[in-house]
Amino acid sequence: MDNSQNLLALCSEHSDLDLSEVEKIRQISGCLDIIADLLESDVFIDCRTRDSDVAIVVAQGRPSNGKSLYLGSVVGEFAHRSKEPAVIRTLEVGMPTMDMRGVTQEDKSVRQSVSPIKNSNGAVIGALVVEKDVTERLRAEKKLSVLTSTTEQLIERGAAQKSSDNTLPYYVTDGIIMFNHLGVCTYANPVARKIYTNLGYLEDLEGLSFKNMIFQGVEFEEVLQKKQVSINELRVGNYVFNINHTYIKNKNDDLSNVVMLINDVTDVKNKEKELILKKVAISEIHHRVKNNLQTIASLLKLQSRRCDDKVAKIAFNESISQVLSIASTHEILAEEGCDDVDIMTILQKIHANILKHGLLINKGVTIKLKGDTFLCDSEMATSIALVVNEVTQNCLKYAFVGRESGEINIEICKGSMYSNISIIDDGIGYDTRSEGTENLGLNIVRRIVTEKLRGNLVTESSCTGTKVLFDFPMNLANRQAVDI
């Protein structure tokens, strides 16, 4: 049984379509391989069965480049609402469904874009389905309009030259223009007419020659020879177009056509420009915040130099270190131009600031940073930076009293659900159970860890040193800001 007989048998057995409707579907099915090659996708025709939740595959087109998602034919298989909702929706409402998840008859996850096939009265008689692997969603979005347009166009192209019965849907988002073998326009859909009107064309497009309608030096003979000529991001006036010229020859007759698809990407490009400008603006804001914080740190440093009280100087240095810790986050954000930063890079900046502005004068204390790294947003990075800075400063102040040297290790451990950072010194230690062991700085640290990072803080100390470890969940997207 050939494909046409099989299609007729399936439609007769499972649907209520009449012979003229089946014939229209049969004609479209003859173009599926062309469409599959054009879209580099698997393409199907599904028809409604007598069960409202089930459709049946009556025709299948596979790309000739071997990139089909299917091992074999699925003609005669059923498409159920629970697995292919896009197909059932389009058959029910008569509107296209774009980029909806589905599960194939071979249990593969795909993205389906579906366009209705209608009879002469406008009633839905089938659905044209294009399937893309989930990993190729972007390509599916770009080429969806080709699916929506090509089927009806190939069926109606013979009548398009003289008849006003052009039934290409008005919801097609791409401009579609068809030229006959002489290079004369025989059809232009409403989107194409609007594009050319906006560009200043006053006359009807049908009847114009190919050379009077192209936007760049593409020859008609070049399209006939190469079969496909594409132009990406072509600027015409205030517009930006992606244009594809494709030579199509129907298998069932000797008619040949050239189809020009015009995808207006002006809005997309304008939004990309807006995003770039916003990115630059955000980067500039981070840069200015960093500069302001460094100015504050410089003012504190000047005040510290005028002060003779050693306790006050220590307090000034602590404040300077805290301000520079926050400034480090904004400095990296200004360099990266985004809101995600590498935590290792942040802590390296803090390490450098401690060496430059901390309490290492006349002490042989070394600070080592090691472990994993991960990306986090600016708020999370700032909280971690403050905690690490404060704990490290406490180590420098109290862990090595009466000693000339020591070592502080800052270790990052990344986990799938929770990550942790530990600050370990080999100092003299202290009794964590005695009252008054936590100063204001450690109280702030505990609040930041528990309330902003939603984690836990653990301190262990003995005569051989002290270990401060805090953990935090990796997903803090829904955290609420807490004033410290």
Image (cartoon, rainbow, N blue to C red):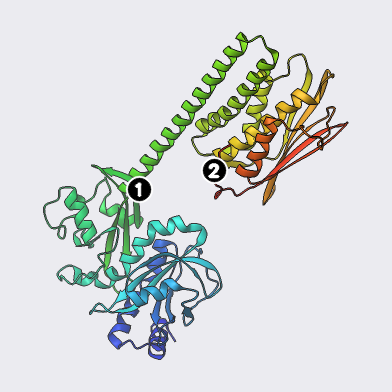
Q: Residue at x 33, y 84 (%)?
A: 22
Say left or right for 221 vs 462.
left
Say left or right for 454 vs 140.
right
Question: Mark 1 and 2 residues: CB-CB less than 8 Å, in contact?
Answer: no
In what quadrant of the picture does the N terminus appear? bottom left
Q: Quadrant of residue 440?
A: top right
Q: Is residue 29 visible?
A: no
Q: Secondary structure at mark 1?
A: helix
Residue type at mark 2 is: Ala
Q: Quadrant of residue 259?
A: bottom left
Q: Residue at x 58, y 26 (%)?
A: 323
Binning the other alpha carbons within 10 Å of mark 1 as few (below 14), some (14 to 19) or many (20 upward) gives: few
- Residues 376 and 277: in front is 376
- Residues 38 and 234: in front is 234
- Measured as percent of width and height from the top left, residue 217 is found at 26, 45
Q: Which mark is residue 268?
A: 1
Q: Which residue is mark 2?
A: 481
- Measured as percent of width and height from the top left, residue 68 is found at 50, 66
Q: Residue at x 41, y 76 (%)?
A: 88
Q: Which mark is residue 302?
A: none
